[in-house]
Amino acid sequence: MSGGKISYSGLTGAQLARFFRDMADTPEGKTSRTSPEFNFDPGNFRKLKIGLKKEPDGFSLKIRAKQPREAACGTAQAETGTGEEAGDFKYNTLKKRMKSRFKTICESLANNTLPGEAVVTAFLRDSRLMTAWPDYGDEYYEAYDQACTAFREAFESKNLEACKTTCQELSRLKKECHDRYK
């Protein structure tokens, strides 16, 4: 495993102890593995989550490694072709910026006016960056990208009602994702 998720079930106490010994050796650079049944190498990670459950047939172990922010930033910029956030690109900064811009868009639409082109362009650019970021709701990204495309098309055609409808869809998807991942 190098980033991503992995799980094991039906582990004995001895297997679990070997796993944790190997894991404790990893930061020290020790490569000898006493438990070959585990394919565990967290690689270069930012966050490592370990879930352990005692079950009737032993233990179940779930591991999730998240890659460093710098790597995710590079992925996001490569996929979107933008480089203006280089160096200070942070997921939380992106979320705050998107929240502010989305609020401006929603307020304009609630007042029956189209939002400004600059705020829409910036919001959609940030949306592309956000959906390129791994491990923060990947399963919602495709539907969100489609809703962003529909919003852009409605905005470009100056269709206020379609903008309102697609904005509501963006809001619904955002709420579902945030309810699950916050």
Image: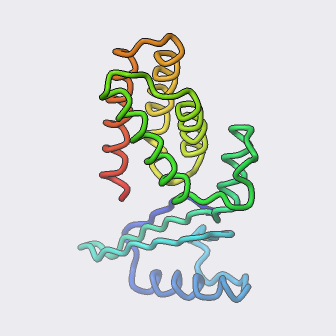
Judged left or right of residue 127, residue 67 is right
Looking at the image, residue 86 lies above or below residue 164: below
Judged left or right of residue 145, residue 160 is left
Residue at the spot 64% in from the left edge and 65% down from the top edge: 68
Instruction: Using the image as rendered, state which of residue 164 and residue 29 is in the foreground.
Output: 164
Residue farthest along the left direction in this orientation: 56
Looking at the image, residue 181 lies above or below residue 52: above
Q: Position of residue 128 (x, y in %)?
A: 59, 38
Can I make out residue 76 in this image?
yes
Q: Position of residue 69 (x, y in %)?
A: 63, 62
Q: Position of residue 29 (x, y in %)?
A: 73, 85
Name the image quarter holding the N terminus: bottom right
Instruction: Using the image as rendered, state which of residue 110 and residue 61 is in the foreground.
Output: 110
Residue at the spot 65% in from the left edge and 55% down from the top edge: 72
Instruction: Using the image as rendered, state which of residue 181 and residue 162 is in the foreground.
Output: 162
Name the image quarter holding the C terminus: bottom left
Q: Position of residue 60 (x, y in %)?
A: 37, 70
Can I make out residue 165 in this image?
no
Judged left or right of residue 90, residue 28 is right
Looking at the image, residue 103 lies above or below residue 151: below
Looking at the image, residue 60 lies above or below residue 25: above
